[in-house]
Amino acid sequence: MKSKRGEGVEILGGETIKMVFSVIGLVALFGLAYLIFSIFLKTDNSMKQATISLDRISSIVRDLEENESRDYTIESPNAWNLIYFSDQDKNPALCEGKTCLCICNSAWLNSYDSLSCTEKNAICKIMNNNIVFEERNYINLNNLPRIIIINKTKEEVIIKYKESNNPDLNK
């Protein structure tokens, strides 16, 4: 196409098209890199969230007086499990053979109808108290936030989850 002055002007020359495809390629490359990085970051965040939740629960247990109870809202990590292991249980190596409380990502039912977990995706804290869950040796942390009630008696600490008005949160 020629301008009024007679100079040759190309609207979308070969160099411009190459530049557009280069920009599209770079955007796609950065998007893929972000996606891969966020996968690794998500796992790391879940471990940090589990550590924060477990630290808070253990400090509540430690600070409670006899016959006192306190509510705590667990907000993360979702779809993990809060599990108690006595020193008699086959517990993760993180427990060092002692009584401990763990938040585990990968857990499975063992032959005693209780949950077990691996150290790979678990955060554990050695406890000085005997802990009892109301129903099993674990609380499923699906559908967070979930409120748990921590009650300290003379012999043990009882942990149970609080029923919600929303039936979906009680699963």
Image (cartoon, rainbow, N blue to C red):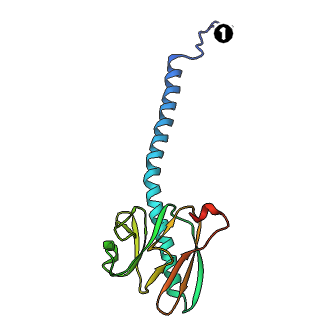
On screen, 38 above or below 78? above
Q: Which percent across, then down, holds residue 26?
A: 48, 35
Residue at x 47%, y 81% (from the top left corner): 132
Classify mark 1: helix, strand or loop: loop
Q: Residue at x 42, y 53 (%)?
A: 40
The vertical placement of 165 against 88, above or below, is above
Q: In the current view of this chain or complex, which residue is farthest to the front?
A: 112
Sort mark 1 into few (<14), some (14-19) or many (20+) by Cα contacts within 10 Å. Answer: few
Q: Is residue 44 left or right of residue 160?
A: left
Residue situated in front as seen by the camera: 168 or 70: 168
Q: Residue 163 occupies which quadrant of the picture?
A: bottom right
The kind of residue tagged 1 is Ser
| The one of 46 and 109 positioned closer to us in this rendering | 109
Work out which quarter of the rendered image holds the N terminus and state it.
top right
Count of numbered circles in the view: 1
* Residue name at image x 52 percent, y 90 percent: 153
24, 66: nearer the viewer: 66
User: Is residue 25 depicted above or below 16 in this figure?
Assistant: below
Residue 60, how many percent across, how many down? 53, 82
Left or right of residue 12: residue 111: left
| In the displayed structure image, the side of residue 74 where residue 98 appears, left or right | left
Q: Which residue is mark 1?
A: 3
Residue 84: x, y in percent? 42, 76
Res. 93 image quadrant:
bottom left
Q: Quadrant of the C terminus?
A: bottom right
Looking at the picture, how far across and down is residue 160, in whole percent?
54, 76
